[in-house]
Amino acid sequence: MSKFALAERVASLPPYLFAAIDKAKAEVAAQGVDIISLGIGDPDLPTPEFIIDALYEAAKKPANHQYPSYVGMLQFREAVAAWYERRFGVKGLEPKNEVITLIGSKEGIGHFPWAFINPGDLALICPPCYPVYATGVKFAGGEVMELPLLEENNYLPDLEALDEATWKRAKIIFVNYPGNPTASTATTEFYAKLVEKAKATDTIVVSDLAYSEIYYDPANKPPSVLQVPGAKDVAIEFHSLSKTYNMTGWRIAMAVGNAELVNALGKIKENVDSGAFNAVQEAGIAALQQGEPFVEKARAIYKERRDATCEALAAAGIEHQVPDASVFVWAKVPGNKTSAEFVTDLLKKTGVVVTPGSGFGECGEGYFRISLTVDTDRLKEAVSRISQL
């Protein structure tokens, strides 16, 4: 038994979902089992060559070898603002005060509650969802209340399910569309209702838009909450180059929106990190300015994978959502097992790794998540193994 007592904020944490999956996967792989890993949403496609070239050239500049700005290079933030205008029609984002560079969106999302949550303050999360929302709030001493996402409501939160007193007490609400793990999408009409409620109750809207560029219908692109008039009064939005440009390991992302919210996050970052490597930011500028043709190719690949996976799931009689966006498929656990039991049996007996829905919150029980991050043939093989369990 260790003589070192963990802080309560750490001791009370459940095991981080994907770390636990990696450990179990390694144990099965050590037995010689052929592993097909559909657990974590880490793109298998390579980073486009022009981005790597941009990094190489930027890394050779001695000026980039020094400490970077805490809030990011102005040139990167200008590129983000310009990209938001091109992609979403969001005009007038001020790069100096309404855009900040992040070392991956996970870092920014995890740090943001520290700026606004005092011990005992309330934050709303919408499970099944990314576990970091709740963890960040709890690390800041806050209280988490769940506003569940249900299939019958198209995985949108029922904003009227909470009374006015609860809304007024809530400091923050986290939303994530396209959703992880459900792959659900939101409309500007939903965002307009959310912004109206937030403005009436002084609730901060935290939007996680990390999967917006992996969509399958060009006529139905996922929107940004900032497209809604007045959203910038209450909202901060997190976005990442990770999934869009296959840059998960590069750790480069951004937050945009209300200047007070962005600058408060900057205050936290001044005290806990030293900023993103300037050479990576220069590569990020290249990605934002030149990357759309490469993203179009990636969408076509993911669409092929989605179609093949959903066709195989349907043939196997496994209920699932056909996603309009993201790199995930959300499916129902067949039979009477819990999602954890199903996933454990699946790994041990077939070598297929998927993620249990319960890992994203209690209302995810009965589901599992498939990541479309291996090639089509391997996805078909994975579903074949799943159907034989």
Image (spheres, rainbow, N blue to C red):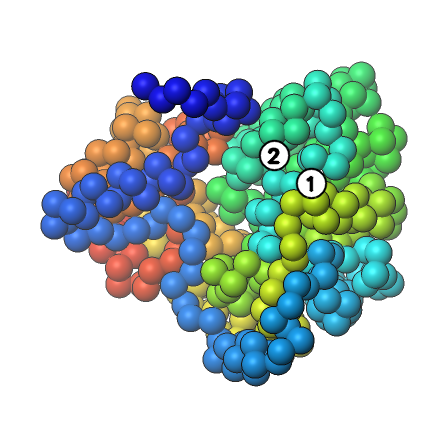
Numbered disc total: 2
Left or right, residue 316 beside residue 225: left
Left or right, residue 102 beside residue 183: right
Left or right, residue 327 beside residue 377: right
What is the secondary structure assignment of the residue under circle 2? helix
Q: Is residue 247 above or below residue 155?
A: below
Give residue 26's position: percent from left, percent from top.
24, 45
Q: Which mark is residue 21?
A: none
Is residue 85 at least partly visible in the picture? yes
Give residue 346's position: percent from left, percent from top.
23, 38
Name the foreground residue: 93 vs 342.
Answer: 93
Name the foreground residue: 46 vs 139.
Answer: 139
Q: Is residue 294 above or below residue 353?
A: below
For disc 2, the marked residue is 136
Which amino acid does the dot numbered 1 rest on?
Answer: Phe
Give residue 64's position: percent from left, percent from top.
64, 73
For disc 1, the marked residue is 112
Q: Quadrant of residue 241?
A: bottom right
* Cβ atoms under marks 2 and 1 closer than 8 Å: yes
What is the secondary structure assignment of the residue under circle 1? helix
Q: Is residue 52 above or below residue 388?
A: below
Name the foreground residue: 342 vs 235.
Answer: 235
Which amino acid does the dot numbered 2 rest on?
Answer: Gly
